[in-house]
Every structure is written in structure tokens, then in C-alpha cells.
Amino acid sequence: MNPELTAEALVQLVHRYHPVGLLNDDPRYKESEEGQRLTALVHAHKTPSPAWKGFIQRLLAEFPDCHLWDTTIPYHDPCYSVRISLPGFVTGAPLYDCIVCLLSQLAPVYALYASHTLKTGPDQGEYWLRYPPFPPEFQAQEARLAGLIESTFGFTRLSNDVLLLPVPDLVPRTANYELGRAQLIDCLFTHHRW
């Protein structure tokens, strides 16, 4: 890992964008220097960067038998995100397995996780998220996607222990969290993982 991207450095970084000890519904949150810095950052990324647009086009070419969904939400969280189904996905089918890619707008880092949904009836089914190691059927796609991210952006993939590191004094700007619940992944990327 790049020496500037240690867990300690990343925790310090997210403290520059999230005010300490404030819930996000507290008016002081948005008024704080950190809150204003984060707002300016997400507003600067309201339009996808040319690099992100090019990356999405490259993914469409590299994964032609997969469903691709750019799940980036402008003005929301400091990350770009995309879901790529495993091959054979059919719209409306009960099974939706995919790999989700999160690229931070705060630092040159990324995360991947596997998402599985199997609908077995109305409001019924099984659902899980997994961080590496992924189940075998996800691993080939995981390796291809990681290679594309690193060759396109030069970003560093964060390990589970770094992603899941607690930052108990922060609350992500869009999360309905109490103090003590946030992890580094929530502040560097998004709390909205499905």
C-alpha cells in the first residue's frame, strides 16, 4: 500500500471531511469547516469525471455478457460506484449476483464487495454482502475488475481490516447513524451498500 494511504492517514483524512461528534441532522454539521469541505467536494463531482465515463465504457466492453449499473448518486456520497452482474443475469429474474466497485473521491483508493439476492417470493428471499475472500463463482470477475481499476486509475484496494476500521466519533453525511457506528468504508465511500 502507498505509505500515504495507511489506515491512520485515511482516518485523519476522513476527519477533514466529517465534523467530530456531530450527528448529520445537527445544523452545525453542514456549517462546520469539515461539512463545507465535503459539500464542496461532492458538488465538484456532480458531473462524472471524464475518467469515470471512460471507465464505464471500458467496463461495458470488457463485460459484454453482464448487466452494468452506474449507481453513483451525485451530491450524495464522496464516491463513484458501479454494480456489475455475474454473467447470465436476466432482468426480472429472481437471482441477482454482482460485484460492486466503490472508488473514493477523497483518496486514490477503492473497495469491492460481492452482493447476492435471490427472491423466493413476495418480500421473501435471501440476501448477503461479502467482503473478500469472495465465493468461488465471483472470483474471476473480481480479479478482472480489480485489474481494470488499478490499470485505469492507479488506485489502491483497501483490505477488510482498513475498510471496517471504526471511526466512532464521526457520522457520514447521508447515514442515519448515531455516533459510534461509522466505519472507514462509510466515510471514504458510502454507508449505502446493498
Image (tube, rainbow, N blue to C red):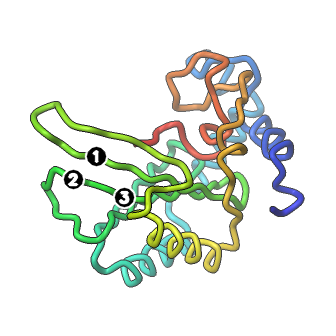
Give the spatial CA distance, label 1 vs label 3: 9 Å
Count residues near mark 1 (Cα–Cα under 10 Å), then give few for <14, some for 14-19, many for 20+.
some
Residue 91 horizontal side relative to residue 87, left or right = left
State the image coordinates of residue 105 (x, y, percent, origin top left). 64, 55
Give the position of the N terminus as an image quadrant.
Answer: bottom right
Residue at the location (75% across, 34% down)? 34
State the image coordinates of residue 120 (x, y, percent, origin top left). 14, 40
Count residues near mark 3 (Cα–Cα under 10 Å), then give few for <14, some for 14-19, many for 20+.
many
Residue of label 2: 95
Residues at badges 1 and 2 in contact (C-beta under 8 Å)?
yes
Please say if 129 is above or below 56: above
Give the spatial CA distance, label 1 vs label 2: 6 Å
Label 3's element? strand
Instruction: Please tell me the numbered disc located at residue 144.
Output: none
**Mark 1 residue type:** Thr
State the image coordinates of residue 153 (x, y, percent, origin top left). 65, 73
Residues at badges 3 and 2 in contact (C-beta under 8 Å)?
no
**Towards the viewer: 128 or 193:** 128
Q: Sequence order check: which comes first, mark 1 or mark 3?
A: 3
State the image coordinates of residue 18 (x, y, percent, origin top left). 71, 32
Count residues near mark 2 (Cα–Cα under 10 Å), then give few for <14, some for 14-19, many for 20+.
some
Label 1's element? strand
Residue of label 3: 98
Residue of label 1: 117
Residue 156 horizontal side relative to residue 57, left or right = right
